[in-house]
Amino acid sequence: MTNLLDASPSGLQTAARILREGGLVAFGTETVYGLGGDATQPKTVARIFEAKNRPRFNPLISHFADAQAAFTQVVANPLAHKLAEAFWPGPLTLILPRAPHSTVSDLAADGLPTLAVRVPKGKTVQALLKLVARPIAAPSANRSGRISPSDAAHVLEELDGRIDAVLDSGPCHVGVESTVLDISNPQRPTLLRPGGITLEALQAVCGTVFMPDTHVDAAPASPGRMLSHYAPHLPVRLNATDVAPDEALLAFGNASPKGAAIYWNLSESGNLEEAAARLFTGLRTLDKLGQTHHLRGIAVQPIPHYGLGLAIQDRLNRAAAPRPAQPPEDLPA
Ligand code: TXA
Ligand code: MG
């Protein structure tokens, strides 16, 4: 059984104790819920992969209460300090060289010479990370390949019985995962994953931001970019300007095609922050209702190509990508 904890002082104490003892606790951040475990304990990290049903090991993000704690585990350069100043706590993950004395386990770092560090925003997660005072590895709290959870109920749908507890801090405000920026070479800040901090905001601090070479990027160094990810059960059709009566519609803006069987508007006013926050819940809702009503798929209206639109489109592209023949998450749970 998975224990549902509230964000009270005693809930926090319990969550912190479980984490220090090597257990798994899902907790809310400003982006999505994370499946947390002590990154310094290899057995705990192995349990994270097992609970998620990840097909293979991936490097995980280590979470900290503040930049000072984060920078004990990596070799921070001046750009790292500048970015931390500008965006932490907040939805930015920095890839930096792992410190020689880093206590993060090789399994959490996937044996890489670099480490992903992040300082999430939110009263509850901040209080939790302060109490635990250790690097906490936390991939999104969903089964591998499935839609990321943006509230505690979603986490239970994915992981009930597979983790020790969920710390409920309500719905996530940003709704898409953190932006992953590789600054291990500060001369070439490289955007590995668009996310909650926009490209425009990064450019304002870093100047030029480089895009990864897609060929190199297919290599295990950034497995989180696996194409079929965030997949609902129903097929997803992108850039839809019309909709069939046997389709669900994921709409954006106030000029949506009429006639969909089921409808979820990401943002009627065309606000990209609102759309990001409503994305995963929308996909999950349409997927569930669509299956119940035997619909043939989910049509998605075009999303603007700026600001958080990049992160939203990235997740939608993955939701629409061809699926592996028999994804592991389709095995009986
Ligand atoms: O918003 C978020 O970042 C959420 C919340 C829970 O914090 N976490 C999250 O973790 O999305 P996950 O494991 O689903 O994604 C981690 C991403 C992957 O794309 C992974 O490849 C990349 O970070 N990553 C981690 N360590 C890396 C490294 N050393 N080099 C390159 N990419 C790395
Ligand atoms: Mg994920």
Image (cartoon, helix red, strand yellow):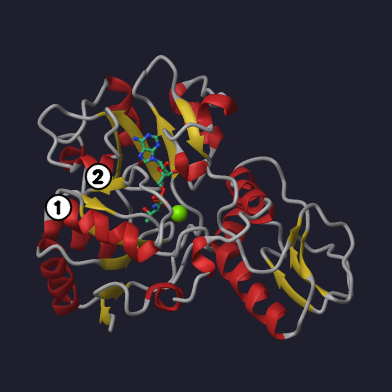
Q: Earlier in the sequence, mark 1 or mark 2?
A: 1
Q: Position of residue 201 (x, y in %)?
A: 50, 35
Question: SS class of the residue under badge 1?
Answer: loop
**Residue 299 visible in the picture:** yes
Q: Is residue 23 left or right of residue 207?
A: left
Please identify the residue farthest to the top as the structure is shown.
Answer: 187
x and y percent of residue 23 in the render?
18, 67
Q: How many marks?
A: 2
- Name the residue beneath numbered marker 1: 41
Instruction: Look at the picture and state if 129 lies above or below 160.
Output: above
Above/below status of 45 relative to 99: below
* Image quadrant, ligand 1: top left
Near mark 2 (Cα within 10 A), the count class, few <14, some 14-19 or many ≥20, is many
**Does residue 252 appear in the picture of this structure?**
no
Quadrant for the N terminus in the image: bottom left
As drawn, 3 above or below 91: below
Q: Residue at x 81, y 79 (%)?
A: 261
Name the residue at 71% across, 61% down: 269
Q: Which residue is mark 2?
A: 107
- Relative placement, left or right, of 241 versus 87 is right
- Which amino acid, by three-letter code, is at mark 1? Gln
- Relative placement, left or right, of 79 versus 104 is right
Type of residue at label 2?
Answer: Leu
Residue 150, numbered circle: none
Ligand 1 within 8 angstroms of badge 1 C-beta: no
Q: Is mark 2 within 8 Å of ligand 1?
A: no
Disc 1 to disc 2, C-alpha distance: 9 Å
| Location of residue 279 (image quadrant) | bottom right
Q: Quadrant of residue 43?
A: bottom left
Q: Position of residue 125 (x, y in %)?
A: 27, 61
Quarter of the figure that contains the C terminus: bottom left
